Image: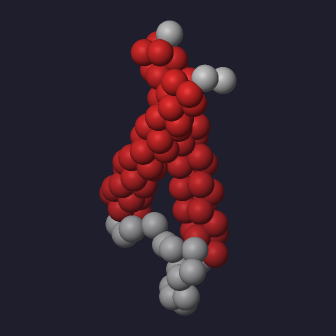
Amino acid sequence: MTSDEKKQSMSAKIVGAVVALAATWVVHRVIDTVWEKTKGHKPPAADSSDDDIKFGEVAAAAAVTGAAIGLSRVLATRGAAKIAARIVG
């Protein structure tokens, strides 16, 4: 790998990480908004110790959040890599 290819690869990784972080933030905000509209409150935190919050609701919030954020990170990273490949191409 030449030094130009290494620089481009590193740039693609940095852009991918930034895009993944942005996507994670957006998905988290969307989940909070949808949850609040449907349930009337924000999703419970995993470390919530409130007695009025049921375990099922905490587990559902964790599952939905984890799956959505994981998927958004994969899509953002792959999308950034494809764009970088086209630019370098």
Depth order, front residue of 84/9: 9
Above or below, comparing residue 31 to residue 84 in the picture: below
Q: How is the image coloured?
A: secondary structure
- Residue 61 x %, y %: 55, 62
Depth order, front residue of 2/69: 2
Q: Quadrant of residue 75?
A: top right
Above or below, comparing residue 19 to residue 53 in the picture: above
- Is residue 40 visible to us here? yes
Depth order, front residue of 21/68: 21
Depth order, front residue of 8/57: 8
- Is residue 76 visible to us here? no
- Residue 43 x %, y %: 45, 67
Above or below, comparing residue 64 to residue 56 in the picture: above
- Residue 7 x %, y %: 51, 32
Q: Quadrant of the N terminus?
A: top right
Say which residue appears at 59% left-offset and 62% top-offset.
62
Say which residue appears at 47% left-offset and 41% top-offset.
14
Say which residue appears at 44% left-offset and 49% top-offset.
21
Could you tell me how many numbered marks the image carries?
Answer: 0
Say which residue appears at 50% left-offset and 10% top-offset.
89
Above or below, comparing residue 35 to residue 57 in the picture: above
Q: Report the residue that reaches farthest toward the top.
A: 89
- Residue 37 x %, y %: 33, 57
